[in-house]
Image (cartoon, grey):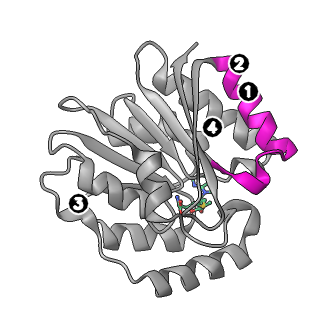
Amino acid sequence: MDATLPGNEGRGRSNPLREGIGFFGRFLRNPASVGAVLPSSRYLSRALVGHLDLAPGELIVEFGPGTGPATAIVAERLPPHANYLGIELDERFHGILTRRFPRLAFHRGSAADVREILAEHGLPRPRRVMSGLPFATLPPAVQDSVIDGIVWALRGHDGDFRTFQYVHAYGMRAARRFRRLMQERFTGFERIGPIMRNVPPAYVLRYWGAK
Ligand SMILES: C[S@@+](CC[C@H](N)C(=O)[O-])C[C@H]1O[C@@H](n2cnc3c(N)ncnc32)[C@H](O)[C@@H]1O
């Protein structure tokens, strides 16, 4: 599949109220997997995406795009010669994403299977990986597979991984476990924020130098 974004039309319109209600409904059905009551704000999404410095043919992969707040920022900033693939587990969110961003590619499945998914789409290892996955509520086995996939994707080049953690959950055991495992496997770490203009406030975490 060709995941190239030829133009900038993938910005994606959305109705924030409807999106918020729909997102909350998915949270009620599956709280551990959705892991948040509201989609991320534009402020958090901008901090998460940062500057998209991608060479021709390079790829950015997003884990758990949800209804697409960070995807909308990617669509604004993605160079026309670069590629994007979103990997989303929830069927309803996957449908919303494909309608909202017709020029971007989405795969319905688990980020734990990123290697197989990229092979299926004929895509190279990504330069950038960003994630909205709720690591604090994911089962340890899923956390471990996702971390293995991120290290596999980023080893041997200077690409980076970005995610966010809510301030109120930053000290939770699963959140600390995730940071400890990541720190063992990456040489570089930066914490940005907290981004206060988000409900709830969150830190952006950036890792590079996969070992
Ligand atoms: C906290 S929400 C974040 C949604 C969006 N990125 C945002 O910032 O508003 C977590 C998202 O991860 C998705 N998700 C959970 N486990 C997943 C997995 N193993 N693979 C892919 N997506 C997953 C959920 O369906 C949900 O869309």
- Asked whether mark 4 lies closer than 8 Å to ligand 1, one says yes
Marks 1 and 4, how far apart in space?
11 Å
Q: Position of residue 142 (x, y in %)?
A: 71, 43
Find numbered disc 4 in the image and state the secondary structure of the residue it sits on: helix
Q: Residue at x 78, y 53 (%)?
A: 169
Q: Earlier in the sequence, mark 3 or mark 1?
A: 3
**Quarter placement of the C terminus:** top right
Amino acid carrying label 1: it is Leu
Asked if marks 2 and 1 touch (Cβ < 8 Å), the reply is: yes
Marks 2 and 1, how far apart in space?
5 Å
Residue 103: give its label. Answer: 3
Asked if marks 2 and 4 touch (Cβ < 8 Å), the reply is: no
Q: Position of residue 118 (x, y in %)?
A: 41, 38
Q: Residues within 10 Å of mark 2 (few under 14, many from 20)?
A: few
Asked if marks 3 and 1 touch (Cβ < 8 Å), the reply is: no
Between residues 44 and 95, which one lies in front from this camera angle? 44
Amino acid carrying label 2: it is Glu
Find numbered disc 1 in the image and state the secondary structure of the residue it sits on: helix
Q: Earlier in the sequence, mark 2 or mark 3?
A: 3
- Residue at mark 1: 181
Between residues 146 and 78, which one lies in front from this camera angle? 78
Q: Does 65 sit above or below residue 52?
A: below
* Magenta span includes 166: yes
Amino acid carrying label 4: it is Val
Q: Which corner quadrant of the figure contains ligand 1? A: bottom right
- Residue at mark 4: 146
Evaluate whether residue 102 shows in this view: no
Using the rendered view, name the quadrant where residue 76 is placed.
Answer: bottom left
Q: Residues within 10 Å of mark 4 (few under 14, many from 20)?
A: many
Q: Residue at x 41, y 46 (%)?
A: 49
Q: Position of residue 31 (x, y in %)?
A: 74, 68
